[in-house]
């Protein structure tokens, strides 16, 4: 009987430990960490500040990627982590939205500067040059005339 109770307790504790371990940043890529931050902020209605964060995060992912495939993988990791964190915060919040938004608004990443060519000057002064500069092309708009 004691073995059965011990087995039941063990089966109940292991999923909780695994779930708690998933909430840590150990073993996560930078894109996943950025995605978790964005997902929590989205779940807590961070507003326009989230747009700024995602712009900086996208340039960070793009400028650190060595290849176009690595860049796409980073974007995918970001989006998947954002989705998971959003769902987790909405369904089983571990921290209050007030605390999350306070931490989010104080991120040093917001002191970074994004340049028109896609370059990124980080808050610590380092500059991440774009691997594939953003090119703005002029698009012609065709206007239909009324008859």
Image (cartoon, rainbow, N blue to C red):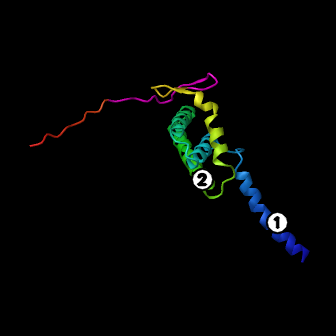
The overriding secondary structure of the stretch rendered in magenta is loop
| Residue matched to label 2 | 84
Q: Quadrant of the C terminus?
A: top left
Mark 1: which secondary structure?
helix
Residue that extends furthest to the right in the rendered view of this protein: 2
Whole-percent x and y of residue 52? 52, 35
Is 13 above or below relative to 70? below
Residue that extends furthest to the front in the rendered view of this protein: 98
In screen coordinates, is 100 left or right of 42?
right
Mark 2 crowd level (few <14, some 14–19, many ≥20, 10 Å Cα): some
For the point 79% across and 67% down, the residue is: 11
Q: Label 2, label 1: how many angstroms apart (C-alpha)?
A: 26 Å
Mark 1 crowd level (few <14, some 14–19, many ≥20, 10 Å Cα): few
In screen coordinates, is 126 left or right of 6?
left
| Residue matched to label 1 | 10
Residue that extends furthest to the top in the rendered view of this protein: 125
Mark 2: which secondary structure?
helix
Q: Quadrant of the N terminus?
A: bottom right
Whole-percent x and y of residue 143? 19, 38
What is the span of residues highlighted in magenta in the rendered image?
121-137
| Nearer the observer, 57 or 101 | 101
**Residue 8 inside the magenta-drawn segment:** no
In screen coordinates, is 84 left or right of 69?
right
Work out whether mark 2 precedes mark 1 in sequence or the reverse, and give the earlier one.
Answer: 1
């Amino acid at each position: 009987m004691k073995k059965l109770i011990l087995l039941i307790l063990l089966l109940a504790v292991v999923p909780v430990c695994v779930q708690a371990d998933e909430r840590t940043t150990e073993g996560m890529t930078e894109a996943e960490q950025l995605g978790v931050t964005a997902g929590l902020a989205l779940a807590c209605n961070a507003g326009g500040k989230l747009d700024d964060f995602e712009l900086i995060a996208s340039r960070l992912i793009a400028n650190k990627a060595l290849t176009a495939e690595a860049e796409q993988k980073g974007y995918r990791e970001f989006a998947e982590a954002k989705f998971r964190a959003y769902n987790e915060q909405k369904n089983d919040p571990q921290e209050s939205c007030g605390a999350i938004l306070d931490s989010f608004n104080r991120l040093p990443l917001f002191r970074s500067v994004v340049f028109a060519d896609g370059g990124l000057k980080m808050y610590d002064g380092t500059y991440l040059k774009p691997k594939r500069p953003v090119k703005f092309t002029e698009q012609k708009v065709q206007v239909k005339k009324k008859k």
